[in-house]
Image (spheres, rainbow, N blue to C red):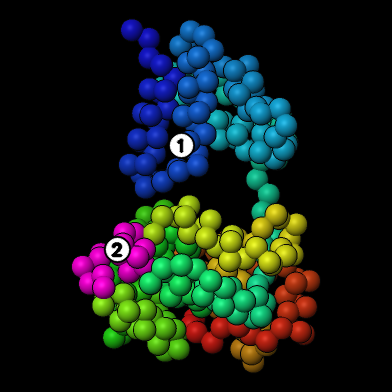
Amino acid sequence: MKQTMVARVQRYLARRRALGYKLHTEGLLLLNFARYADRSGPCGPLTRAIALRWATFPPHAKQAYRARRLETLRIFARYQAVVEPGTEIPPRHVLGGGYRRRPPHLFTRAQICHLLQQTDTLNGRLRPLTYRTLIGLLACSGLRISEALALTTEDVNLDQGVLFVRQSKYQHSRLVPLHRSVLLHLRRYARRRHQSLSHAQNFFVSDNGQALGYFNVCRTFRRLACALTPSNGRPNVRLHDLRHTFACRVLLRWQRSRRGVAGRIATLSRFLGHTHLRDTYWYLSAFPELLQQAVCNVPPFVSSSP
């Protein structure tokens, strides 16, 4: 019996994920391709023709999106060609470059204050304080939103002032020290949360004690930030821009210090949970104009570590 493309992709994803790769977006794209391929005809090996037909959908999609679809498929095809020699690997860059890091929006202090004030407009007993504390923590620690939402009560050590981030991106764990000013707000939230939801496992929870969902948090954040105009051409500011803002503020403060930035990038890289130093150096290479402007006009936002 011939195997389906869905079966091929599922086997590939299982093996990659066993190595520690999460492949959330890539997995959805590949399964979408697999279902498309199985509907298109006989369940033979992957071909360049069907790869290009799928990658160029939908017709109105931007070039970069199509290129990313094809690049995701190329990675799968290279693997599949080893176990199934009849597999054809799509040509590289035939649809252009698939990945380009766009400059993020850098929040000003006034914009962050606006976000925190807007949380008072939310309904619920605990919900306004939950979002106020969550947004404040992201701005002052540089955590990824997925890392903050995954925190349990055991991961938040309010006595020692340390967060334990478990099995984050690429299955890496790390300790994140917090400034005492951040701890004051976390303790306040923990007290309010414990009064009615003492048995909840997650640190940030909804009013019924359930873990906050990623998409619901993003939707609520867009509502809170609807009055803010992005500085990078995107339609909306993003939660992840709080992490970028934190990193840039730290670099700005270091630039102004006597010691400077040299030799300290590795510290920030580890603090942010970057796997490669180049991901941290990107802030220096991608925003020289923005950084210079911030040095001259914007006071440092965070006073927390690193």
Look at 40% across and 87% down and name the residue there: 184
Q: Main secondary structure of the magenta part?
A: loop
Q: Is residue 144 left or right of residue 236?
A: left
Counting from the top left corner in percent of width and height, residue 100 is at 68, 49
Q: Is residue 207 magenta?
A: yes
Along the line of sight, the residue nearer the viewer: 12 or 236: 236
126 to 83, vertically: above or below: below
Part of the protein shown in magenta: 196-211
Q: Residue 35: give x, y in percent of width and height.
A: 48, 22
Task: Name the residue: 72% across, 75% down.
Answer: 291
Label 1 Cα neighbours within 10 Å, binned few <14 / some 14-19 / many ≥20? some
Q: Nearer the viewer, residue 77 or 31?
A: 31
Secondary structure under badge 1?
Answer: helix
Q: Residue at x 35, y 74 (%)?
A: 163
The one nearer the camera, 184 or 83, is 184
Q: Amino acid at mark 1?
A: Gly
Q: Is residue 48 visible?
A: no
Q: Residue tagged by mark 1?
A: 27
Q: In which quadrant is the N terminus drawn?
A: top left
In this picture, residue 103 sits left or right of residue 40? right
Residue 39 placement (x, y as % from top left): 50, 14
Q: Position of residue 168 (x, y in %)?
A: 39, 58
Q: Which residue is mark 2?
A: 209
Report whether residue 259 is seen. Answer: yes
